[in-house]
């Protein structure tokens, strides 16, 4: 099954998981709005909470993108107390939110994507953060040919604000990948996680 064929199932799983997490864990009623595919070099946000996933057939990222105000409101709902600034506590909350959404979506996605493993979340906050990782000049590529640079996004609204949950799926090149290859891929993803956390530390300094 190619990436485009997974799109509808990913959107459905993310909608269900996000609404369930917000309802049961945050006591928030959220409404799913539009869903779309977006080139990552066109994504700009104030806060990103994301994690990597990998399996025998697919690998990629799940992320929550929000403004500072929306992140503060989500953290308030989780903590049950007022939030006046984007601090480490808010970032921890957003990391836990993406972790819960990914955990809920994972069980729904495994029928079509196979067994998936989740790594630890990472969170970056700033102003109009860009997440592009590919070169200029690739604007006319299709979703399938540039899947690693595209996010399948769904926008959610709540209390006059909104946030977006996205999945960036990639097919594992060799479906006959063995355990040794998976271990190597896990090490690569863990290394990328460490590099992202180092970048976050540098941004703070």
Image (cartoon, rainbow, N blue to C red):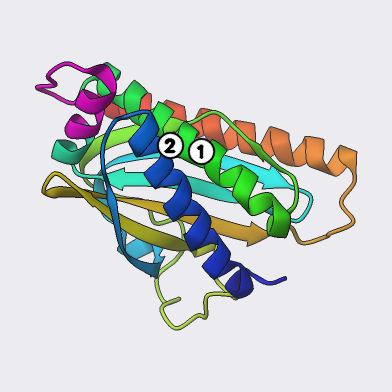
- Report if residue 104 lies within the magenta region: no
Chain part drawn in magenta: 72-86
Q: Which residue is mark 1?
A: 51
> Left or right: 30 with respect to 201?
left
Give how far apart the Cα atoms at labels 2 and 1 are: 8 Å
**Residue 50, horizontal then vertical, whole percent:** 44, 39
Q: Are marks 2 and 1 in contact (CB under 8 Å)?
A: yes
Question: Which is in the foreground here, disc 2 or disc 1?
Answer: 2
* Looking at the image, residue 2 lies above or below residue 177: below
Q: Circle 2 sits on which residue? A: 98
Question: Residue at 31% across / 26% down in the picture?
Answer: 91
- Left/right placement of residue 79 relative to residue 188 reads left
Counting from the top left corner in percent of width and height, residue 164 is at: 32, 52
Res 33 → quadrant: bottom left
In the image, taking residue 140 as reference, residue 42 lies left or right, namely: left
Q: Is residue 205 visible?
A: no
Nearer to me, 9 or 140: 9
Circle 2 crowding by C-alpha within 10 Å: few under 14, some 14–19, many from 20: many
Quarter the N terminus occupies: bottom right
Residue 32 in percent (x, y) is at: 32, 57
Residue at x-position 44% and y-position 31%: 122
**Residue 140 in sight here:** yes
Element marked by disc 2: helix
The image shows residue 136 at horizontal and vertical percentages of 40, 70
Q: Residue at left 49%, top 60%?
A: 12
């Amino acid at each position: 099954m190619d990436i485009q064929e997974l799109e509808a199932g990913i959107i459905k799983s993310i909608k269900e998981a996000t609404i369930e997490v917000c309802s049961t864990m945050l006591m928030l009623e959220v409404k799913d709005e539009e869903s779309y595919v977006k080139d990552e070099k066109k994504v700009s946000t104030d806060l990103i909470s994301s994690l990597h996933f990998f399996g025998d057939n697919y690998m990629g990222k799940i992320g929550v993108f929000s403004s500072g105000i929306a992140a503060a409101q989500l953290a308030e709902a989780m903590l049950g107390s007022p939030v006046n600034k984007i601090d480490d506590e808010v970032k921890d909350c957003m990391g836990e939110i993406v972790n819960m959404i990914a955990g809920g979506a994972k069980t729904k996605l495994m029928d079509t994507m196979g067994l998936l493993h989740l790594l630890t979340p990472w969170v970056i906050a700033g102003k109009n953060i860009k997440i592009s990782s590919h070169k200029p000049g690739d604007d006319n590529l299709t979703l399938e040919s540039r899947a690693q640079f595209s996010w399948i996004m769904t926008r959610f609204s709540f209390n006059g604000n909104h946030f977006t949950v996205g999945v960036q799926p990639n097919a594992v090149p060799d479906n006959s990948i063995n355990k040794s290859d998976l271990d190597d891929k896990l090490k690569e993803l863990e290394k990328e996680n460490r590099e992202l956390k180092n970048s976050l530390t540098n941004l703070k300094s």
